[in-house]
Amino acid sequence: MAAYLVDWLNLLVRWLHFVVGIAWIGSSLYFIWLDNHLRPPADPDDDAKGVGGEAWSVHGGGFYHAQKYRVAPGQLPERLHWFKWEAYWTWMSGMFLLGLVYWYGAEVYLIDRSVAELSAASAVGIAVAFIVGGWVVYDLLCKSPLARDDRVFAVVLLLLVALLAWGLCQLFGGRGAYIHFGAVLGTIMVANVAMVIIPGQRKMVDAAGRGEAPDPALGIKAKQRSVHNTYFTLPVLFVMTSNHYAMTYSHEYNWAILVGVALAGALIRIYFVARHSGKASLLPAVLAVLLLAGIAAAIAPRSPTDDSAAVSFDQVRNVVQARCTSCHSAAPVHPAFPAAPLGVMFDSDEQILGDAARIYQQTVVTRVMPIGNLTAMTDAERGVVEQWYLSLQDQP
């Protein structure tokens, strides 16, 4: 019953995370778009009032006229909309899910003893240290002289992100490493909102309310962090879906794949940000496509060589029963799974034969199963599955 309740909690919080994440990322992408579509105000009176740019748009049968002030309006309106809770709820629901799935279930989803021998407590402690430390290092970097040169800053940040991916993949199973990579970047993004953007905006609003000219440096700092957030967005979204693609996180060079895909996402975002401002070079988008194509080619499965003795179905059945049916059964005995994952069961010979391709793909090609190698499947046993599957393909 406890595992059943955890499943429901997982479902509901994941739904919440999905909804508020859409709200946050949607508003973030919109405001980046808006900033890059602003044009000098057509009305001289608007320019005299301090309007720095405006944009007209049409949506849902209506016309909208958005204006942005160079610093602040002479008089604040009675109602001022803030965009913060979308970010806060995305982070809170995401951290709850991280704790529920990857920390509470550390033995299943975070720890892989073929990668590193960690206890659940030490693995969770390391994970927390990465998340907190990631923000501290990034924030110090933003406050350092390196941040004055965008290109230098981008190179340094890329190197640190690559180091982050490599370090996580040396400590955790691939799936857990990927999601924690996203958690570090996501925490940086929401901390940018909570620790820099919103406090700066509050100071600007307070100054305008007192009739004083707000400090424009606060707006510049907020804009810098907002731009960083938009380049983190696509890498984080990839990580959120990566658990469906074992070909990436289970690979021997999973950290390099993660860095490559994250870089491709950032390049795609660079192109679209530039495109919003007008005519943009296609180079970032082309580089992103070539990078993704290169990764796909590099990790493509290789045709195995069939040079081993044939195996019997009895051997395969023994391997499946010993390593798979503790979870993939009508009555799983593993406490983390109240029901067979994805409804996949191997209780009968017919079920094993019917899912031969899936068994081969998951245990041999991606090696993602058993998850975290909980049942300690050996290379020899994976070889048995491989030879059995290949022999099936040779049959007329």
Image (cartoon, rainbow, N blue to C red):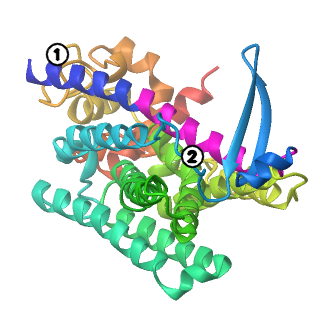
* Residue 191 on the magenta segment: no
Reading the image, the residue beneath label 1 is 331
What segment is highlighted magenta in the picture?
18-42
Whole-percent x, y for residue 354 in the image: 45, 16
Give the residue at x 29% y 41%: 92
Furthest residue in direction front, as rendered: 211
Q: Amino acid at mark 2?
A: Asp
Pick the residue in front: 40 or 394.
Answer: 40
Give the amino acid at mark 1. Ala
Q: Which residue is mark 2?
A: 306
In the image, which is nearer the foreground, mark 2 or mark 1?
Answer: 1
Q: Is residue 376 above or below residue 286?
A: above
Task: Report which quarter residue 149 is drawn in.
Answer: bottom right
**Residue pictured at 55% horizontal, 56% vertical:** 226
Image quarter in which the N terminus is found: top left
- Please identify the quarter of the rendering in which residue 70 is found: bottom right
